[in-house]
Image (tube, coloured by chain):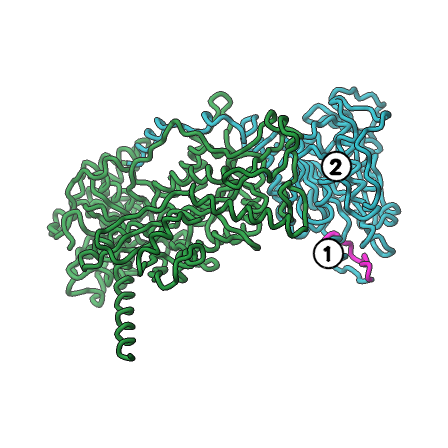
Chain colours: A green, B cyan
Amino acid sequence: MSGINNFAFKLANVNGTGSASANGLLMQAIFRMGIPVSGKNLFPSNIQGLPTWYEVRVNGEGHTARTPDFDLMVAMNAETYGRDIAEVVPGGYVLYDSTWPLDAQLKRADVTLLGVPFARLCTEHFAESRERILMKNIVYVGTLAALLDIDMATVHQMLEEKFERKPRLKDSNRKAIELGYRYAREHLDCELPFGLKAMDATADKILIDGNTATALGCLYAGATVAAWYPITPATSVMDAFKSLCQRFRRDPVTGKNRYAILQAEDELAAIGMVLGAAWAGARTFTSTAGPGVSLMGELLGLGYYAEVPAVVFDVQRTGPSTGMPTRTQQGDLLACAYASHGDTKHVLLFPCDPEECFYFAVKAFDLAERFQTPVFVLSDLDIGMNDWAVKRLKWDDSYQPDRGKVLSAAELDALKKYYRYWPENEDAVAARSLPGVSSKGAYFARGSGHNKYGGYTELPSEYQEVVDRLARKHRRAARAVPAPVIHRTPGARFGIVSLGGCDGAVREALGLLKQRGFLADYLRVRAFPFDERVEGFLSSHDVNFVVEQNRDGQLRTLLLAETSVEKRRLKSVRVYGGFPLSARDVVEGITAKLAAERQAEREAHQEE
Amino acid sequence: MPSIKKPPVAHPSLQPNTLGLSLRDYEGAMSTLCAGCGHDSVTAALVRTFFELNVAPHMVAKLSGIGCSSKTPTYFLTGAHGFNSAHGRMPALASGAAAANRDLTIVGISGDGDSLSIGLGQLCHALRRNVRMLYLIENNGVYGLTKGQFSASSDVGSRSKKGEKNLQRPIDPVLLGLSLGASFIARGFSGDKQQLVALLKAALSHRGFALVDVLSPCVTFNDHEGSTKSYKHTRAHRLTVVETDFVPPAQEVTAQQEPGTTLSVTLHDGSTVRLSRVPEDYDPRDRSKVFSWLEAHQHRGEIPTGLLFLDEAHGDMHQMASTVERRLHDLPFEELCPGSAALEAFQKDYH
């Protein structure tokens, strides 16, 4: 039931009209009131003129996964009035621009309409035409402040900070907010059955998107060379890395850069640059999305076979092909796990929120250099581009990067002879040597058949010896990657397995299912190759529901291929329309599966 | 190359260079290319060039793609790291290596298939990026490893070994480089080692992307009558536009300068390229003039060679990226990681 600090509202706008900053302002104000909040930006693949939505969920208990149930709709786009008004829960409210009358057909008996003449107010109070459009958004912030009890002091404080150096903009924003606030107070009944009340649940938190957190991780891990090709939704990883580097990586004396960001001609070149830089010894990465991973396939195999460290951030969007570039999905699991032709297997990390994006970014560089192989970090559009309230990031100043085994000139000189792929250590990895260090370490990196000494070969035994070690190396990495997170529920009969950005919705769903008498243990996979605990968990439940955001159950496929668990134990719950997962999706998915099973059992009995 | 393996001991008559290394120290593994392959002559010129420039082998990084040409990095500088990457992708790997370690001498060896077909995009963009490297195309107008298909540099009317006539217009790396803004463009011939060594020395001293197109005939698939990339055809139609003489930094330029026909260009490392017998209507520093001159002469079937264009003023990749003048790959971690206090402060903006 909705109530104080427990409701959701949705803002329907036209993109390119400045609504994003207004919506960000709203969410940040609620966050600063100490109330757990989340915002999901559902935007079109377009620059100006198409419908765009922003969903805000407020939940005092801390459940901030997406919810599809909206108590209030801020309908600012006449073109989508119909579907927007239809989305409101019975008993809910619609705030609309009453400058123009609302089509009688759109009215709903079970929904209260709240009209504010946003356009007229702006025309009367602002002179410039662009300002009139932009300020409409700010006016509704003021109205919502009145309706939802947003703390006005907090809002004003935020305007002070935001427009510190732009006094004119500050004044018009302040004026617009006052207009909306005053109009609501004077003309509307502001006593809604839900609203805000200050709490103290966000003091140790920050509001950050996953791509910024990823870029911070790259900065802190000491990455110096980055190569990329612009692509939604990964672009802001590199945008953020660049601005962080401009702030933290300038030589204080010369003003020169302690980093290089190469904007490549395509993703083929981006991963090529990463491999070249890594071969020469740099900590290096690229950020991309599904279409980029497809193009990188060729050289990811080279990185795997020649054993070159590389970090690839794949901010997943919906596929196949161009798909829906501004919608989220977990559709690249298999494409990344086995990227490239021939026998290849990669290391994948699955962060569940921006906090893990930060820590996993650092981890990815350590793993890539320790195991001398490409490592993928798979986030998605929801994690990467939406603002999440997460625990403040911490940095351990005693951290030293794990650069893996790299031989110095002195170490090379002490050897009788250096071989690139022999002898191997306990990780099934052999020491690297970098160009520019010593002639003694010179070798040929190659994607063609090679033996353990690094020499060209076409002999079956020599070839197999190397690729068998690569398989062994991949298995060894299972012990080094982030361990799965397991929540046990006493008396649980079922298992739920999920990954990445599904986490919030699944954890919320666990509580809802419990209320219905369905007790389940929960395991969140955080990496591939799978830790042995993953198989242990799956085997200890007769039925495990694998919850993921793709059509084909790619995590389930990967679990079946890479563990010895029986197929019958893994049931699939898949949500893949492109919006972030909600707890309702999970609950409905699992209950539908269970009902179908019971039905099947009944039919089987009847046949007997 | 079916010949006997050379003894590991250097002949006493071989003089060491200033690093105390002999010519033999700049050689590589035995070539496995066909006997008489132009590429082996290019390899020999590279060995001579590095020896005479006193380059420390371990400071060189040799990169290549796929194809006969791309095998050649194995045949010189055993003491240098090599990366035999994927078909057409060498320019990206070279860009990355150059970004990570600016002290390396980057040598990219490619062919006409590797550079002008599958890797054309990467060539263009590495050139635009002005990565400091020697980019050498061993150009024979044919796919050798897959046995004789036309390549993108095959001339119109040139015949394959099986008699088929090429009808598509060729991509000329020199004209391509000129139009894309390359800062150093040369064309050599594997049959003229003296000229090639001078060109390679100048290329390696250039601060930027040095494009060297070398006509390097394929004796097995493209050396017959009717081919425009054969030894015979190249010798008959080659035109040395400018004589190139390379003078290292320490040496004085002594030769008499004839006004009008001789031109000296000082490179960033202090060495000098002396160009002589420059035609009256030719100026290797004037991009549009060079373009029209070459086009007119090539239209007549001539094959102009020499250091054809040079622009020392253009900044290389590191200058454009304003990077510190140190190797990025081993900057101390303390200079890269802002630490916990900075992270704490940074997050104030996120509350």
Image depth: mark 1 or mark 2 in front:
2
Disc 1 + disc 2, Cβ < 8 Å: no
Q: Secondary structure at mark 2?
A: loop
User: Does residue B231 appear to the left or right of B268 in the view shown?
Assistant: right
Q: Main secondary structure of the magenta part?
A: loop
Q: Chain of mark 2?
A: B
- Name which of mark 1 and mark 2 comes first in the sequence: 2
Q: Residue at x 79, y 42 (%)?
A: B40
The magenta segment is B150-162
Question: Are the residues flagged by discs 1 and 2 from a single subunit?
Answer: yes
What quarter of the picture does the C terminus of chain A occupy? bottom left
Q: Which residue is mark 1?
A: B146
Mark 2 nearby-residue class (10 Å; few <14, some 14–19, many ≥20)? some
The spot of residue A175 in percent (x, y) is 23, 40
Q: Secondary structure at mark 1?
A: loop
Do we see residue A400 in this rendering? yes
Snapshot quadrant of residue B350:
top left
Amino acid under disc 1: Thr
Disc number at residue B28? 2
What is the CA distance from the residue labelled 1 to the residue labelled 2?
25 Å
User: Does residue A356 appear to the left or right of B129 in the view shown?
Assistant: left
Which of B343/A546 is in front? A546
Q: Residue at x 77, y 32 (%)?
A: B49
